[in-house]
Image: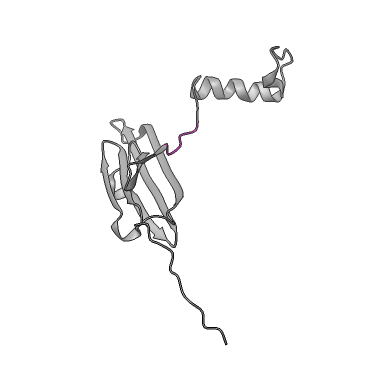
């Protein structure tokens, strides 16, 4: 609610203290990383583009569960620098994971194709062929 008012809050409260700490520690633009995904309609298929920078192809999994396509990616990195005595000067560990689910009820799941290049996952989702609804004549007893 306070973000909607054009006035700055003058009191130094716990919220401002945390916000200032976050701004100083993480930098001004500290947004949570997400798996940014675009989906284009190419006529006979959809193309899903998911940005996964820093992941290797082996870190990424695509699973089909019923009418859902599940994209998951996970990786761990560990960097360490030691001095001449073998003691750490700096040691950093990072962990990243994403998990997204997409409805593929109108997709030909047997012909889905995927390619990963330059940090972007491309998934080709061919549409099911349109078919006329089946008609039946019922017997009257």
In the rendered image, residue 78, in percent from the top left (x then y), is placed at 35, 40
In the rendered image, residue 63, in percent from the top left (x then y), is placed at 38, 57
Q: Residue at x 61, y 23 (%)?
A: 19
| Quarter in which the N terminus is drawn | top right
Q: Quadrant of residue 130?
A: bottom left
Looking at this view, is 92 or 61 the one in front?
61
Judged left or right of residue 77, residue 103 is right
| Quarter in which the C terminus is drawn | bottom right
Query: Magenta span: helix, strand or loop, mainly?
Result: loop
Q: Residue at x 31, y 54 (%)?
A: 112
Vertical placement of residue 19 versus 58, above or below: above
Please state the extent of the stretch shown in magenta in the rendering.
32-36
Looking at this view, is 113 or 93 the one in front?
113
Figure coloring: one colour
Q: How many marks?
A: 0
Vertical placement of residue 64 versus 89, above or below: below
- Residue furthest front as drawn: 140
Looking at this view, is 3 or 11 the one in front?
3
Vertical placement of residue 113 versus 49, above or below: below
Looking at this view, is 15 or 66 the one in front?
66
Find out whether residue 57 is within the magenta segment: no
Judged left or right of residue 101, residue 40 is left
In the rendered image, residue 113, in percent from the top left (x then y), is placed at 28, 52
Judged left or right of residue 132, residue 116 is left
Vertical placement of residue 46 versus 90, above or below: below
- Residue furthest right as drawn: 11
């Amino acid at each position: 609610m306070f973000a909607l008012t054009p006035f700055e809050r003058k009191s130094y409260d716990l919220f401002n203290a945390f916000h200032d700490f976050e701004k100083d520690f993480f930098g001004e633009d500290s947004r949570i990383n997400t798996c940014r995904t675009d989906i284009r309609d190419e006529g006979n298929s959809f193309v899903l583009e998911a940005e996964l920078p820093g992941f290797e192809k082996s870190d990424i999994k695509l699973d089909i569960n019923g009418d859902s396509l599940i994209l998951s990616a996970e990786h761990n990195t560990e960097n360490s620098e030691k001095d001449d005595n073998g003691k750490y000067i700096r040691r950093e560990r990072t962990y990243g994971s994403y998990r997204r689910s997409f409805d593929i009820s109108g997709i030909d799941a047997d012909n889905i194709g995927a390619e990963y290049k330059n940090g972007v996952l491309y998934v080709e989702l061919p549409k099911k062929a349109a078919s006329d609804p089946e008609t039946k004549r019922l017997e009257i007893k």
